[in-house]
Each structure stands twice: as structure tokens, then as C-alpha cells.
Image: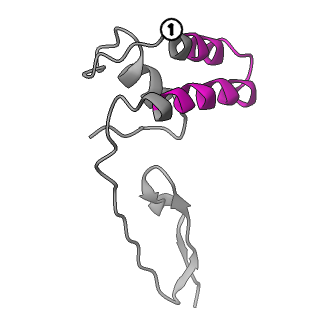
Amino acid sequence: MTSSDYPFLETYLAPVHGTGADSNATTFSNAEFDSLMKQGDSAPSMAEAIPFYQQAEDILAEELPVIPMFWRKVAALYSENVDTFVWNEVSGAAYGEISLKQN
């Protein structure tokens, strides 16, 4: 199962689905996908890169080189003693940012 290690589309799109990528076990190859990834990589800012990565991801959804079979289930519990609870979409509970109420 592959998941991204950072909340950024590129971290799993090109390494897993780019033509000739080491982790491209499906041997998926699409020139338009590769071109969009390069455009995103060369964009001057993250905000300008994201639309290219989203378009590339749309190609993957159309061609479906892998079947999404696994979904991560994550649970978190907290009590009335918690002052601030922070949830990170990539790694779950952000324990370093959670604080308890002061009594």
C-alpha cells in the first residue's frame, strides 16, 4: 500500500505512476500525465503547481492503473480535559500540537 508522506500531491503521483519511476509497479505510462507533472514541478509556487497535479490525478482516475483497494481507518479519542485537539490529514493526531486544559 502506498501513501503520501507529506500533504502534497506530487509525493505519490510521480514516484508511483510516472513513466519509468522505480515504484511504478504497474508500468503505467502516459505522456500527458508526465507532462502535467513536469509543469507542476516547474511552477513558481505551490498554489500554481497544484492545478497541474490535480489534472494529472484526473488522468489516473480515468485510466485507473491501480485499483484503490485499501483505505486507512484511523480513530482518535479525547476527553473534556483536552484544550486543543489537532488532526493532521496525513498522520492523524498531531500529538505535539495537542494541549490539556489547565486546572
Location of residue 40 in the rendering, given as x and y in whole percent from the top left corner: 63, 18
> Where's the N terminus, which quadrant?
top left
Query: Nearest the camera: 73 or 83?
Result: 73
Query: Nearest the camera: 95 or 43?
Result: 43
Location of residue 3 in the rendering, given as x and y in whole percent from the top left corner: 37, 40
Query: Nearest the camera: 24 or 6?
Result: 24
> Where's the C terminus, which quadrant?
bottom right
> Magenta span: helix, strand or loop, mainly?
helix
Q: Which residue is mark 1?
A: 31
- 1 w.r.t. 100: above or below: above
- Relative to 29, 100 lies left or right: right
Residue at image position (45%, 62%) is 95
Local crowd size for mark 1, using a 10 Å CA cut-off: few (<14), some (14–19), many (≥20): few
Residue 58 shown in magenta: yes
Residue 39 shown in magenta: yes
**Corner quadrant of residue 29:** top left
Residue at image position (62%, 27%) is 55
Residue at image position (34%, 44%) is 68
Location of residue 78 in the rendering, given as x and y in whole percent from the top left corner: 45, 81
- Relative to 42, 20 lies left or right: left
- Relative to 22, 49 lies left or right: right
- 87 w.r.t. 7: above or below: below
Colouring rule applied to residues: one colour
Location of residue 31 in the rendering, given as x and y in whole percent from the top left corner: 50, 8
Q: Secondary structure at mark 1?
A: helix
Q: Which residues are magenta?
A: 35-60
- 101 w.r.t. 48: above or below: below
Q: Amino acid at mark 1?
A: Ala
- 32 w.r.t. 54: above or below: above
